[in-house]
Structure formats: structure tokens, C-alpha cells
């Protein structure tokens, strides 16, 4: 028996947040307090780099070769210290 499902597309964010240095935990900390920028404020090259990193991470977590990289010799190995 074969069941076909239509997958929902991923939710595209409206903004990006900045990485901040680690600090001691504070009561009442909210991730909403992180600096953020609208996607429209970012340079096209920055957006492209973010998209490339996301795509690479999706295929890495799926343990699949990215068809866009066909012909590029890259071994698919888990990276130490990174969650799967």
C-alpha cells in the first residue's frame, strides 16, 4: 500500500537575529530581546549565503547528497560536536 502526502513548505522567517556572546543566565530572558533585522534590510549576498547554509544543513541532517552539487566530490560525514 502506497500513501502519498503533500508536504507543507517550510515557514520562511521575516527577520534574522544576531549571534550574541554567551552570558550568565538571567531571569526573564527572552529570545525576542536579541537584535534582529528584516530580510528586506539585508544585502542580497548575505541572503544568498544564509540560504546556502540552510540548504547544506538540511541535506547534511538528512544524510543525503545535494543534487545541486552533482559532480562535486564531497564525502557525507557527520561533523563532530554538531547535533543531528
Image (tube, rainbow, N blue to C red):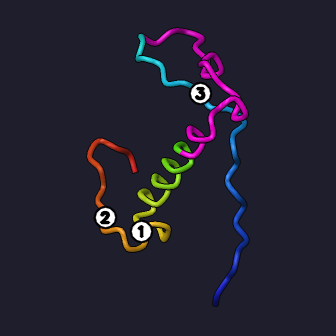
- Residue in the foreground of this view, choosing between 81 and 46: 46
Q: Is residue 2 above or below residue 20?
A: below
User: Which image quarter is the N terminus in?
Assistant: bottom right
Task: Name the disc covering residue 65, or none.
Answer: 1
Residue in view at x 69 percent, y 46 percent: 12
Which badge, 1 or 2, comes first in the chain's sequence?
Answer: 1
Spatial distance from mark 1 to mark 2, Cα to Cα? Answer: 9 Å
Spatial distance from mark 3 to mark 1, Cα to Cα? Answer: 29 Å
The answer to whether residue 28 is magenta is: yes
Q: Is residue 64 above or below residue 36?
A: below
The answer to whether residue 14 is magenta is: no
Which badge, 3 or 1, comes first in the chain's sequence?
Answer: 3
Dot 1: element = loop
Which badge, 2 or 3, comes first in the chain's sequence?
Answer: 3
The answer to whether the residue labelled 1 contacts the one labelled 2, judged by CB atoms less than 8 Å apart, is: yes
Q: Which residue in the structure is indicated by mark 2?
A: 74
- Within the image, what quadrant is residue 60 found in? bottom left
Of circles 1 and 2, the one toward us is: 2
For the magenta stretch, what is the residue range? Answer: 24-48
Percent position of residue 64, x then y: 42, 67
Dot 3: element = strand
Task: Name the disc covering residue 31, or none.
Answer: none
Residue in view at x 54 percent, y 24 percent: 18
- Residue in the foreground of this view, choosing between 21 and 67: 67
The answer to whether the residue labelled 2 contacts the one labelled 3, judged by CB atoms less than 8 Å apart, is: no
Percent position of residue 61, x then y: 43, 57
Q: How many marks?
A: 3
- Within the image, what quadrant is residue 3 found in? bottom right
Q: Which residue in the structure is indicated by mark 3?
A: 17
Of circles 2 and 3, the one toward us is: 2
Spatial distance from mark 2 to mark 3, Cα to Cα? Answer: 30 Å
Q: Residues within 10 Å of mark 1 (few under 14, many from 20)?
A: some
Amino acid at each position: 500500500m502506497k500513501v502519498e502526502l503533500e508536504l507543507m513548505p517550510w515557514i520562511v522567517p521575516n527577520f534574522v537575529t544576531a549571534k550574541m556572546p554567551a552570558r550568565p543566565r538571567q531571569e526573564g530572558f527572552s529570545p525576542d530581546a536579541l537584535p534582529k533585522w528584516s530580510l528586506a534590510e539585508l544585502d542580497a549576498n548575505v541572503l544568498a549565503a544564509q540560504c546556502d547554509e540552510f540548504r547544506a544543513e538540511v541535506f547534511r541532517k538528512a544524510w543525503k547528497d545535494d543534487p545541486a552539487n552533482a559532480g562535486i566530490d564531497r564525502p557525507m560525514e557527520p561533523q563532530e560536536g554538531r547535533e543531528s
